[in-house]
Image (cartoon, rainbow, N blue to C red):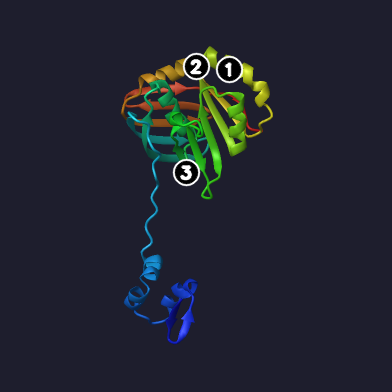
Amino acid sequence: MAIISGKIIRCAELSHVVAFFPVPLFLLSQSHPSYYTSFHTAPEKTKQAHPMAKNATIYKVELSVTDMDRHYYETHNLTVAKHPSETDERLMVRVLSFALNAHEQLEFTRGLSTEDEPDLWQKSLSGEIDLWIALGMPGEKIVRQSCGKAKKVMIYCYGGSTAEMWWEKIKNSTSRFANLEVTNFSRDDTRALAELANRSMRLSVTIQDGDVMVAIDDSTLHVTPVKWKSVA
């Protein structure tokens, strides 16, 4: 509380008092320095980066997205940490997955460094997980848990016949998950993407009618995602 002109003012009312009473701010700051700091010098919010794996290789990516299907046109400057066990193929699938779902709230997680997070996620301002993106061939238990944590779950799988065998095994047990979407990239596409990987990339992704064109420097690659399961 503070006493101004003989009247007791509660802390919650001080911001209004400063606005309507001609009390010099230095008097408030001297007698109640915490009030001045609280109302006038609040620290700026900063986005904390996720801890990176030890010995991770850092990739800098300038990603320009032209998504005519979603009417999304933005450029993102990304810092991508490549886990020591991660291949160039998987790294490029991660970057492509970001491009296909690009949003200001979408971000890379700790990925291979933890079992509790997907490869990318998008959270609401209240902390709820709006989108959970996983790569590869997760087991039925992990898929079930993921669908219970997020409003929408997307799995991007790759690996040729290995991915096809995985899907044949898991598809019946996952049909009940209305918020699950599964998309496959062909082995030829992901291997071609891997050949374009470098630690400093200017990458352009254009999406139209589900077809994807990836351009890096003078190289252009057409990728055709195949949707194996759609959300209900």
Q: Residue at x 40, y 66 (%)?
A: 38
Q: Which of the labelled discs sits on residue 210, or is there none?
A: none
Q: In the rendered structure, which amino acid carries the disc numbered 2?
A: Gly
Q: Are marks 2 and 1 in contact (CB under 8 Å)?
A: yes
Q: Position of residue 122 (x, y in %)?
A: 50, 40
Q: Earlier in the sequence, mark 3 or mark 2?
A: 3
* Residue identifier under label 2: 159
Q: Amino acid at mark 1?
A: Trp
Q: Dot 3, crowdedness within 10 Å: few (<14), some or many (≥20)?
A: few
Q: Identify the residue under disc 3.
A: 105
Describe residue 164's horizontal placement relative to residue 55 as left or right: right
Q: Which element type, helix, strand or loop, lies under badge 1?
A: helix
Marks 2 and 1, how far apart in space? Answer: 10 Å
Q: Is residue 92 above or below residue 12?
A: above
Question: The C terminus is located in which quarter?
Answer: top right
The secondary structure type at the circle numbered 3 is loop
The reply to whether dot 3 and dot 2 touch (C-beta < 8 Å) is: no
Residue 112: image quadrant is top left
- Asked whether the residues under the numbered discs 1 and 3 touch, taking CB atoms below 8 Å apart as contact, a structural biologist would say no
Spatial separation of the CA atoms under disc 1 and disc 3: 31 Å
